[in-house]
Image (cartoon, rainbow, N blue to C red):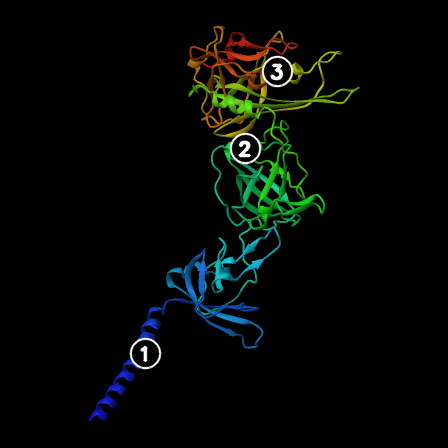
């Protein structure tokens, strides 16, 4: 009797196990019936195993069901199962690759480091033009290297006041949308898009420089693709420049202090082949400038004082040509016809006033005026009017300024010639600051002078020959060039 009980128990246990296995397989097959099955062919399986993950944009969307050799034994074929809810992400021109540790060239960096402590897996990506979804049981040729979207889409949209520009390079060297742009080692922007030139001669790299840093880019700035560079000697020691580009390539640039004009949106520049030799010392007045900002008393919220950059060259037939670059301020308002204008010192924007020539008026070979509107960017400007009798006052027109840019209300400007008491200067994140003490002329040329909250004068110089700071009253401005009250 005991034998019969033992036999019945054994048969029941075996039957239960068989039924459980069958039921599990049936349920699993039923649950995965709508999953997308894709076969991907590689030259080498690179340690890929059944059960490995399949990822899309870093998210696990499926698994590797089988890894086998092709019929001719020359390829490795991985059978993938992609969950039905993610099947639409796998398209006809999607790229599949095996993620394993890869050490590329310096700019390309290191990828797949996470698989040092876990199994290899398959990742895929689908560009915007990847076509319709893949059909079931399709055979796809896998990529042998990680795929990068070189310019298929923007990394991030431009914000108001950001600088959008383009750098031309010979090769992308691992740059992708989202790669950093650095100035003095600080991240000041990013790569938005990469595009191969139509003739294949170069790569166009579109950059975005954040609004607060756009003044660091001038037409004298030098750009390069950061790649680690070993320099030095055995005796004196070695140093490595741009070491951070080993793992994450980026674009870098340098701007000589006090040189060049701010650039406008759409600026295009050719990148240096290698990192140039640079001298990036601190300017001698760094502490004084920092203290001036710290000592700012209060904000002037509705008086628009903007920054002006001017550069000119005097042609001298007997000596070397003279160049001048000045950074100044000016009062922004609008004329009755809607044009946006900036009132400033003539010594801030007119080479004929700045240079002297014993033979008469100086010969100005080239000049350029740029005005920075915080919410818009850098725009070109032109002289509309200059004061008579060599008085230090001028009016600039900004032709491309948008109609909705905020200007100084007419009620905050007075033309009665009253003596000024306070000075307005531009702030970093705000159009104007109010400070109590007039600094040097070089720091505040063209700034607005106030009395009782109204602009009554512009800070200029005493005369064409004398550089002492002096208020230039607004009363000399013609009536037709004043805002309508």
Looking at marks 1 and 3 on the same chain, the residue that comes earlier in the sequence is marked by 1
Residue at x 49%, y 38% (from the top left corner): 158
SS category of the residue bearing label 2: helix
For label 3, the crowd category at 10 Å Cα-Cα, with few meaning under 14, some 14 to 19 and many 20 or more, is many
The residue lying furthest to the right in this view is 318
Task: Say whether residue 163 is left or right of residue 317.
Answer: left
Of the pair 402 and 311, the residue shown nearer to us: 311
The residue lying furthest to the front in this view is 235
Q: Position of residue 372 (x, y in %)?
A: 53, 26
SS category of the residue bearing label 3: helix
Residue at x 54%, y 56% (from the top left corner): 111
Residue 443 figure quarter: top right
Q: Which residue was labeled with disc 1?
A: 22
Quadrant of the frame with the N terminus: bottom left
For label 2, the crowd category at 10 Å Cα-Cα, with few meaning under 14, some 14 to 19 and many 20 or more, is many
SS category of the residue bearing label 1: helix
Q: Which residue was labeled with disc 2?
A: 214
> Residue 347 — which label?
3
Q: Are marks 2 and 1 in contact (CB under 8 Å)?
A: no
Task: Say whether residue 284 is left or right of residue 302.
Answer: right
Quadrant of the frame with the C terminus: top left
Q: Position of residue 168 (x, y in %)?
A: 63, 43
Distance from Cα at disc 2 to Cα at disc 1: 67 Å
Looking at marks 2 and 3 on the same chain, the residue that comes earlier in the sequence is marked by 2
Task: Say whether residue 235 is left or right of residue 82.
Answer: right
Q: Where 28 sits versus 355, above or below? A: below
Looking at marks 2 and 1 on the same chain, the residue that comes earlier in the sequence is marked by 1
Q: Where 13 sits versus 162, above or below? A: below
Q: Where 404 sits versus 167, above or below? A: above
Q: Position of residue 316 (x, y in %)?
A: 76, 20
Distance from Cα at disc 1 to Cα at disc 3: 92 Å
């Amino acid at each position: 009797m005991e034998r019969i009980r033992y036999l019945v128990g054994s048969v029941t246990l075996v039957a239960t196990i068989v039924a459980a296995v069958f039921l599990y397989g049936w349920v699993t097959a039923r649950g995965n019936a709508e999953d997308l099955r894709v076969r991907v062919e590689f030259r080498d399986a690179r340690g890929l195993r059944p059960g490995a993950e399949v990822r899309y944009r870093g998210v696990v969307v499926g698994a590797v069901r089988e890894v086998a050799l092709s019929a001719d034994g020359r390829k490795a074929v991985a059978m993938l199962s992609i969950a039905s809810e993610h099947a639409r992400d796998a398209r006809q021109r999607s790229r599949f690759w095996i993620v394993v540790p890869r050490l590329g060239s310096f700019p390309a960096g290191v990828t797949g480091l996470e698989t040092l402590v876990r199994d290899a897996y398959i990742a895929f990506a689908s560009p915007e033009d990847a076509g319709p979804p893949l059909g079931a049981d399709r055979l796809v040729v896998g990529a042998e290297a990680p795929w990068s979207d070189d310019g298929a889409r923007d990394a991030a949209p431009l914000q108001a006041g950001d600088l959008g520009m383009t750098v031309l390079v010979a090769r992308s060297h691992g740059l992708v949308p989202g790669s950093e742009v650095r100035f003095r080692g600080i991240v000041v922007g990013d790569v938005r898009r990469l595009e191969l030139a139509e003739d294949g001669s170069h790569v166009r790299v579109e950059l975005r420089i954040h609004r607060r840093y756009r003044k660091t880019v001038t037409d004298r700035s030098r750009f390069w693709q950061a790649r680690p560079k070993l320099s030095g000697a055995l005796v004196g020691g070695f140093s490595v420049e741009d070491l951070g580009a080993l793992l994450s390539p980026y674009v870098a640039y340098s701007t000589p202090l006090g040189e060049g004009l701010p650039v406008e949106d759409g600026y295009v520049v050719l990148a240096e082949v290698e990192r140039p030799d640079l001298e990036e010392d601190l300017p001698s007045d760094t502490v004084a400038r920092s203290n001036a900002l710290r000592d700012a008393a209060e904000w002037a919220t509705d008086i628009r004082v903007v920054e002006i950059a001017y550069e000119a060259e005097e042609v001298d037939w007997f000596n070397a040509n003279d160049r001048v670059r000045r950074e100044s301020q000016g009062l922004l308002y609008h004329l009755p016809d809607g044009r946006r204008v900036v009132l400033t010192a003539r010594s801030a924007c007119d080479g004929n006033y700045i240079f002297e020539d014993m033979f008469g008026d100086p010969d100005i070979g080239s000049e350029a005026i740029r005005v920075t509107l915080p919410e818009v960017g850098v725009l070109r400007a032109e002289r509309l009017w200059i004061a008579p009798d060599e008085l230090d006052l001028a009016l600039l027109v900004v032709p491309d300024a948008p109609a909705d840019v905020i200007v100084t209300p007419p009620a905050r400007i007075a033309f009665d010639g009253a003596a000024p008491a306070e000075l307005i200067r531009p702030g970093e994140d705000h159009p104007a600051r109010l400070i109590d003490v007039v600094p040097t002329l070089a720091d505040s040329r063209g700034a607005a002078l106030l009395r009782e909250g109204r602009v009554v004068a512009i800070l200029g110089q005493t005369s064409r020959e004398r550089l002492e700071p002096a208020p230039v009253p607004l009363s000399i401005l013609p009536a037709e060039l004043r805002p309508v009250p």
